[in-house]
Image (spheres, rainbow, N blue to C red):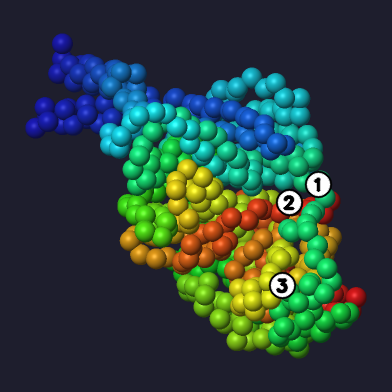
């Protein structure tokens, strides 16, 4: 009996020794970087997935701070680039990137690594060109517009809106163990609906709960409601707001009749509303606002001014009740200011 | 020596044995990850070398890299090899947009030149990107396939079925050319 007890304790201590040895070994974090076309890619590779999945990343101006869950040893690659410096302090790694405009974050497995894409100034300061640079004669442009509705010049009254909170149900969108895109965008959309209804507008939502709605069903729902404005809400992996509108596409008369190109007649109004909302978000939160033109189905099929707002990634923005209310409030006030402009 | 002392001695010895096993485990026994075989599939008639154009996403854009491989005559086998190289390049450049655990289940080329690529569910389930990530993932895949194969268009299937979307932003239930042959327009930023 005593012998058995001794053997049991022996094994217990053996395991303890094993654990003590493994935990005493500090995590090694490899730092690599590469620069291409004004995108600085910084790769932080760890040995265990926990160090990557639990690492918190903060970004302000030219500084990116990475907070690891424990002590680590940094194995850096020699930095030969004068716009990038790094400093290790305790559990934190500070990356100082000159002329930083915005960052994008990726967490990868096998091997576990954190990829930080830092976009530098000169990349994003290029002037915006229209998607199709060639210009048709005015008569042809006139023909190319969808015949159903044409963009109204001047003031546009927005009485009916459709809000489209992205993802839902089994489609989580961007997610980590702490948050999911589908929940955050739904909370913003619900708050926005409440505020817009207070302004005596008719507001519909493509989903009001956590359920999966296909893109086609969303498009059909939006078209049926004949809105004056459609706002789709998503989230980005970067630290900015991104607003998408439809690019101008040269179409033949036949093509312009397709549902697929319904948005073509509303691009100018969509851009004006996008600008009003973007300016308001910038003023309110002092977070960068990027504008992008892309052919995205939920916009291109909408026969009304339409835009997608991507909220900053939850890694960079604190989605407290107050901030969610502020985002919705800013958007609703921007719509009012657009109408009054 | 008393029994208590003996027991204590055994316990110390066992503890030291534990530490020793730990050392052996970490420095000798622990297996290094084995490199993935890069050998091309042993099929098709190899007569020469060809260069594949592999497109990969970098910083919101699609970049290109060339890879030299032995010539493969069968278009299906070549498609398999092109996809293998595409995944390898994506990993090599840490693009991060290809979801974890994605596998190609099947490849088929129809008589009208449409390439059907059937992925497992991981491509949809494990996708964690935003609009641009989804666009550049599908675009780089489309450009890679269309540039290296004698095909007209590409259709993506998930788990042997037609799927509506991968990440909830773009439609893939139709050939990809319509949405993914266009270029991304540059970003305009409002200064802070």
Q: Relative to the observer, which residue lies in front, A273 or A144?
A: A144
The residue that mark 3 highlights is: A264
**Any part of residue B53 in sight:** yes
Q: Is residue A148 left or right of residue B177?
A: right
Q: Residues within 10 Å of mark 3 (few under 14, many from 20)?
A: many
Chain letter of the residue carrying label 1: A
Q: Are marks 3 and 2 on the same chain?
A: no
Q: Which mark is residue A126?
A: 1
SS for callout 2: loop
Q: Are marks 1 and 3 on the same chain?
A: yes
Residue A269 place in picture, x, y as percent: 79, 73
| Mark pair 2, 1: CA separation | 7 Å
- Circles 1 and 3 in contact, beta carbons < 8 Å: no
Q: Is residue B186 left or right of residue B156?
A: right
Q: In which image quadrant can residue B156 be found?
A: bottom left
Chain letter of the residue carrying label 3: A
- Circles 2 and 1 in contact, beta carbons < 8 Å: yes
The answer to whether residue A213 is above or below residue A283 is: below
Q: In which image quadrant can residue A272 be found?
A: bottom right
Position of the N terminus of chain A, as image quadrant, is top left
Q: In which image quadrant can residue A71 be found?
A: top right
| Mark pair 1, 3: CA separation | 24 Å
Q: Residue at x 57, y 44 (%)?
A: B57
Q: Residue at x 53, y 48 (%)?
A: B143
Q: Nearer the viewer, mark 3 or mark 2?
A: 3
């Amino acid at each position: 009996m005593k012998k058995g007890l001794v053997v049991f304790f022996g094994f217990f201590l053996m395991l303890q020794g094993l654990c003590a040895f493994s935990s005493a070994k500090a995590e090694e974090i490899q730092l690599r970087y590469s620069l291409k076309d004004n995108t600085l890619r910084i790769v932080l590779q760890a040995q265990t997935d926990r160090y990557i999945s639990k690492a918190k990343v903060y970004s302000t101006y030219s500084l990116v701070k990475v907070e690891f869950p424990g002590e680590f040893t940094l194995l850096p690659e020699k930095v030969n680039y004068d716009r990038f410096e790094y400093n290790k302090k305790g559990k934190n790694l500070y990356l100082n990137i000159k002329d930083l405009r915005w960052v994008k974050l990726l967490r990868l497995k096998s091997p576990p690594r954190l990829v930080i894409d830092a976009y530098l100034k000169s990349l994003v300061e290029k002037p915006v060109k229209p998607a199709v640079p060639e210009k048709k004669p005015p008569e042809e442009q006139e023909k190319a517009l969808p015949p159903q509705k044409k963009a109204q010049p001047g003031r546009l009254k927005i009485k009916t809106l459709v809000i489209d909170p992205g993802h839902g149900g089994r489609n989580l969108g961007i997610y980590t163990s702490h948050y999911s895109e589908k929940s955050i965008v739904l909370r913003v959309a619900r708050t926005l609906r409440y505020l817009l209804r207070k302004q005596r507008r008719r507001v519909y939502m493509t989903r009001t709960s956590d359920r999966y709605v296909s893109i086609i069903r969303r498009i059909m729902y939006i078209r049926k409601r004949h809105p004056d404005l459609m706002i789709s809400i998503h989230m980005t992996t970067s630290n900015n707001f991104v607003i998408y509108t439809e690019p101008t596409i040269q179409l033949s008369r036949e093509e312009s009749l397709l549902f697929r190109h319904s948005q073509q007649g509303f691009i100018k109004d969509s851009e004006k509303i996008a600008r009003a909302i973007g300016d308001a978000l910038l003023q309110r939160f002092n977070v960068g606002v990027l504008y992008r033109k892309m052919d995205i189905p939920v916009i291109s099929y909408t026969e009304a001014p339409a835009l997608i707002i991507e909220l900053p990634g939850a890694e960079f923005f604190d989605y407290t009740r107050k901030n969610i209310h502020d985002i919705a409030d800013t958007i609703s006030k921007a719509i009012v200011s657009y109408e009054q402009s | 020596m008393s029994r208590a002392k003996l027991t204590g001695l055994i316990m110390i010895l066992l503890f030291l044995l534990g530490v020793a096993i730990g050392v052996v485990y970490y420095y000798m026994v622990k297996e290094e990850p084995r490199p993935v075989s890069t050998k091309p599939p042993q099929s098709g008639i190899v007569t020469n070398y060809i260069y594949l154009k592999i497109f990969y996403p970098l910083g919101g854009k699609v970049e290109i890299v060339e890879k030299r491989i032995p010539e493969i005559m069968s278009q299906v086998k070549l498609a398999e090899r092109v996809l293998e190289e595409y995944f390898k390049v994506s990993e090599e450049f840490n693009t991060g947009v290809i979801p974890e655990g994605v596998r190609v289940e099947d490849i088929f080329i129809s008589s009208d030149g449409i390439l059907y690529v059937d992925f497992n569910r991981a491509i949809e389930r494990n996708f964690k990107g935003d609009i641009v990530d989804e666009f550049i993932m599908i675009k780089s895949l489309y450009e890679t396939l269309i540039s290296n194969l004698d095909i007209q268009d590409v259709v993506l299937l998930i788990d042997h079925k037609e799927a509506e979307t991968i990440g909830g932003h773009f439609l893939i239930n139709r050939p990809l050319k319509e949405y993914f042959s266009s270029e991304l327009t540059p970003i305009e930023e409002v200064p802070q």
